[in-house]
Amino acid sequence: MSFKFTWYGHATLGLETGGYKVLIDPYFTDNPVASMSADQAEADFILISHGHRDHIGDVVSITERTGALVISNYEIATWLNSQGVVTHAQHLGGGYQHPFGYLKLTLALHGSGLPDGSYGGNPAGFLLTTGDGEKIYLACDTGLFGDMGLIGEQGIDLAVLPIGDNFTMGPDDALRAVQLIKPKHVVPVHYNTWELIQQDADAWADRVSSETDAEVHVLQPGESLII
Ligand code: NI
Ligand code: MN
């Protein structure tokens, strides 16, 4: 009854559950804070939240080496198919029972243009129910929205939220997100990659700890958490 969460730096995440390795938004090459290189990444499944370069970066090379199945929205899945990547397409609000759990794509307020200018559909977050019934919400790149409260109604064990500001929620809105979602555990991501999204995660953690019941885990790139 546990899962392992790893932050590889920026918004690149790993989940290990039910014996499967799930890699989210693999961006190692040119990522100034990546804890390892793309050729070290392991994955049975890869989730892509949206088309931006800092999320889709290394997906083709990692799938060629690992044979991982990529799960993303229909538009990104189709774009990856044309590069020889095997995919499973889903879309916002739709869930599917994968071997590692029931995965639903959630709303995200962001963009999703692909690196070559192709249309990348709508950006997504992910809500995963593991085989043991744990609920993990990866907000991915998004602004604050009130329907995070609906996601929270399900009882979230771990929420992973951006705090970098400029491109996504900043610390104030991420605190409001925690108040809406009411997760047991929360991890901040998508900050300190570049000067533009520099944030004091420890100061944010102090605010979350004093104003909510969530337990905050400020990780270093490469660090894992077992819940
Ligand atoms: Ni983005
Ligand atoms: Mn991003």
Image (cartoon, helix red, strand yellow):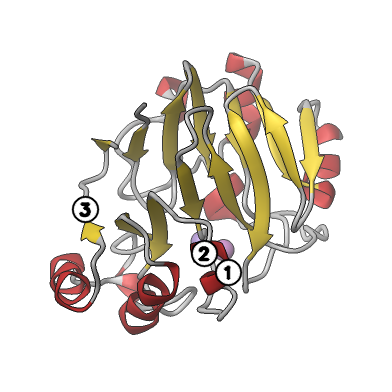
Label 3: few (<14), some (14–19) or many (≥20) C-alpha neighbours in 10 Å: some
Label 2: few (<14), some (14–19) or many (≥20) C-alpha neighbours in 10 Å: few
Toward which corner of the image does residue 79 lie, by quadrant?
top right
- Position of 78 with respect to 104 (left or right) is right
Label for residue 153? Answer: 2
Q: Where is residue 84 in the image (x, y as percent from the top left)?
A: 81, 26
| Label 3 sits on residue | 217
Q: What residue type is labelled 3?
A: His
Q: Where is residue 12 in the image (x, y as percent from the top left)?
A: 44, 45
Q: Earlier in the sequence, mark 2 or mark 3?
A: 2
How far is mark 2 from mark 3, CA to CA? 22 Å
- Position of 185 with respect to 88 (left or right) is left
Toward which corner of the image does residue 128 lie, by quadrant?
top right
Q: Where is residue 43 in the image (x, y as percent from the top left)?
A: 52, 23
| Label 1 sits on residue | 150
Residue at figure coordinates x 79%, y 45% from the top left: 90
